[in-house]
Image (tube, coloured by chain):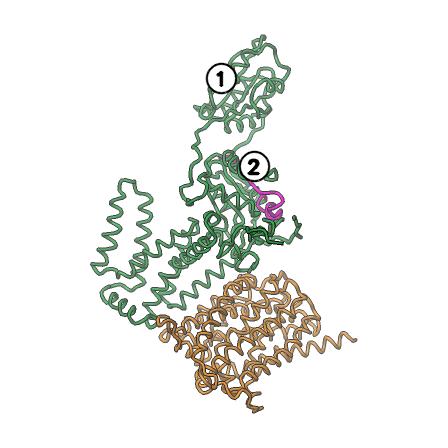
Chain colours: A green, B orange
Amino acid sequence: MTKIRKPRPLVTTDQPNSVPAGRQSPQPDTVNWQAPADPEQTIAQIQSLFGNSADLQVHRFQVFPERISCALVYLRSFVDLKELNQTVLNPLLQQAAMPKDMADLARSLPHAGTKEGITIQDAAQALTSGEVVFLVSGFASALFIPLKKYEQRSVTEPENEKVVRGPRDGFIESLWTNVGILRQRIKDPRLRLEVFTLGTRTSVEVCLIHLEGIANRQIVEEVRARLQRINVDRLLAVSSIAEFIADSPWSPLPTYQASERPDRLTSALLDGRIGILLDGTPLALIVPTVFWDFLKSPDDYIENPYFSSFIRMIRLTSHLITLLVPGAYVALTTFHLEVLPQSLAVIIAGARTRTPFPTAVEMFLMELTIELLREAGLRMPGVFGQTMSIVGALVIGEAAVTAGLIEPIIVVLVALTTLASFVVPSYPAAISIRLLRFPLILFSASMGFFGLFLGAMFYLMYLVSLRSFGVPYFAPLAPLFLKDMGDMFIRLPWWQQFRRPTYYRPQDDSRAGPNQKPGPDKEP
Amino acid sequence: MNVAKISSRQFTWLTISITLATPVLILPEMIIYYARQNAWLALLLGTLATLAGVMLNLALARKFPGQSIVQYAQILLGPWLGKLIGMLYALAFLYLTGVCLNIIAQIIEISLLPETPLWTFILGLSLFAVYSAWLGIEPIARANDLLLPPNLLIAGSILLLALPHGKLYQGLPVTQLNLTAILKGAFPPAACLSEIFFILMLAPSLNKPEELKSATLKGLLFSSFFLTFVTQAFLFVLGVYRASIYLFPALRLSEELMFLDIFERFESLILTLWILLNALKLSVFTYLYALTAAQTFNRKSYKGFLLPALLFLPVLALIPRNLAEILQVWLNTISFKLVLPAVFLFLPGLLLMIAKVKHHV
């Protein structure tokens, strides 16, 4: 079943600039001392490195029959104290014999993942990632015991990507919990995880995930290389990784996908795409991404194929409505009134006689008002919700029309475009499209339909020129991949989708065996 | 020079777009004017003539796989004469783009926006052409993948919608052997279709060079079939007289259509589709102009030659004063009788002969 494809060269639009030697990085001052055998000296060095930070705690005690002085150094803010007392301090105090060396001591402690380190730098790094540093007088090394404890919320349903009948779990802020959720879904030893520590000050773990044997090796290597190129002091959001590694960084539409849903990441990995998880954010970054991924939702594979196909058409239409309708209305009323049927033209002309502004100005004002309402609704404390709807609906909608400032048709159209912009399942794509319609209104106001189509053609030309990690952004439509059309505008039933999407260039593209259409056995 | 690659299907579709783009609106009227009911025969003859020319071009291209005409002209004729031929080709592309640009702009002005000055359209379209040429042939081919199928589908369905209005007797008599009229009618389609000479420049971009011949011929035959379909449809629906006196029978025909009593006046839709196709054609020709110029002067990147195009295209397109002048002088005389025969038949023929002679020596 597996078919090894001949590797094609990866064509990307990514051209890394070489970093000039002078501005290498915002590295903090690094010092590499050998850890001295005297704990007090080490403690003093660590304390000076942390600048006597308030949460740096040192616990000195003496153990073993020989009364050797020891010390536990830890950050109070995220170490499990109870665990420390019960499983480290207690056994140590009861130890009868002096261990030969640190490794011997580590074996007697009930903590998997205990490491030995010899430099102060390692010790500081271990402290900042929630480990306890254990120093023993006379030994020129230290033990790092992982006892990290910090608050994390439980796995809940993703707020921004809801589905009607799908799984309810979402990613949370802890990387390893997320990986666990993923492992729960893909029980395959070929699931590969690589962890990078990025961000010179935040030192956060970034996890690159792919499925060996499915994901294209060249793309994986490309992603890895671009991740390793990142050199910045902080990485706080998945989208800031994306902005460092994505192709065509100036593109208004994202060339990457971010999702809170484990099922989405799972199906992306199984399609041969690559996931990136960042510790501290409940989002997974998925690359490579094509434009049409923003029109798909996990719902499509849960509901029946007819409805899924229908709803995809609705989403595509709503994209086009958001983008084109304001411009088209401006073009129609300003230049091409003759195209309209007579009855409609009369209504529009009647409304136009009462309003003082040109249509384009009205359209701009109204669109801006809606954007204001939207942003205000997001930022406003919840108790003012009632005020908001009164202001929005009554004052702006009703009163502006009654006063003759705005024609009612414009209010209808703006409401329609606002509604349509929320239909798109992907939030980043939706906000980009919202922005892109403003230039089109200008184009239409100055050149009518010709301007509208010229503007749209400029957009189209730009979008088809994009690539996301070597995958053309408008695949499988431009360039056309006829084989992948079964999961584009329409969604074929599962027993007909034998192949993974070929535009992601998976190494093994067979997804399901043939002849699985359910039905009674044929009479011989 | 790093040449972007397109697949042979994209090549075929580009051929269709380019050979259909301008002719589909202006050609039927010219053919019917001369050949009357024999339009199909004229188109057949025209296609045959173009086919002969294409075979000549293909034979030349096959002798130098992976190279464009500018490159092998320099090999065959030496650097100076070769560069001269390269410059001729660059000018030909620029000229054809300018003429096409002017025709589109005039038609938009006449039928869509009569009060807007011509330069807005010309400037907008030149900007677009230069921008997409800047992005390269790959995005243009992809945009073509996206636009051509719905374009043909909608155009075809509008024509089907028109067919019930047709009367079969308007297409009769099917043959009326008036040889001079047929030959006169065969000339415009042959000349229009010979814009396919662009394959001499685009051939190296094909990712499978051995499929050049089939890709080109498929595109050409499809275009000529579609043109025949359109022309015969006009003949049946409008009749010889009306089809030959209207400047753009397609627009007249769509004005009379009506669907469910609500959807009427399809001409803006037709015009939009036509502009989309032509915008792609302009982009390809602008790209090829820049590529030709770059290869003539041995430059690494063609993009430097796009800025002059941004200046010269609008200037060139603004010279003709009206539609009659552009159609009679710039298109019928200069394009059809001078530029296209030279770049499609004469120069390739010359190069092919020299190649044969040199090969034997």
Disc number placed over residue A195 in the picture, else none: 2
**Residue A168 seen from this side:** yes
How far apart marks 2 and 1 lie (CA) works out to 31 Å
From this viewpoint, which residue is outermost toward the front? A523
Q: Which amino acid is tagged 1?
A: Asn
Q: Position of residue A226 (x, y in %)?
A: 56, 45
**In which quarter of the view is residue B71 placed?**
bottom right
Q: Which residues are magenta?
A: A202-224
Give residue B91's position: percent from left, percent from top.
57, 74
Picture residue at 33% right of the left edge, 49% below the top: A374
Residue A308 within the magenta-colored segment of the rendering: no
Residue flagged by tag 2: what amino acid is it?
Answer: Val
The chain under label 2 reads A
Q: Name the foreground residue: B1 vs A156.
A: A156
**Quarter in which the N terminus of chain B is drawn:** bottom right
Task: List the residue tagged with mark 1.
Answer: A85
B177 shown above or below A176: below
Q: Is residue B93 left or right of residue B161?
A: right
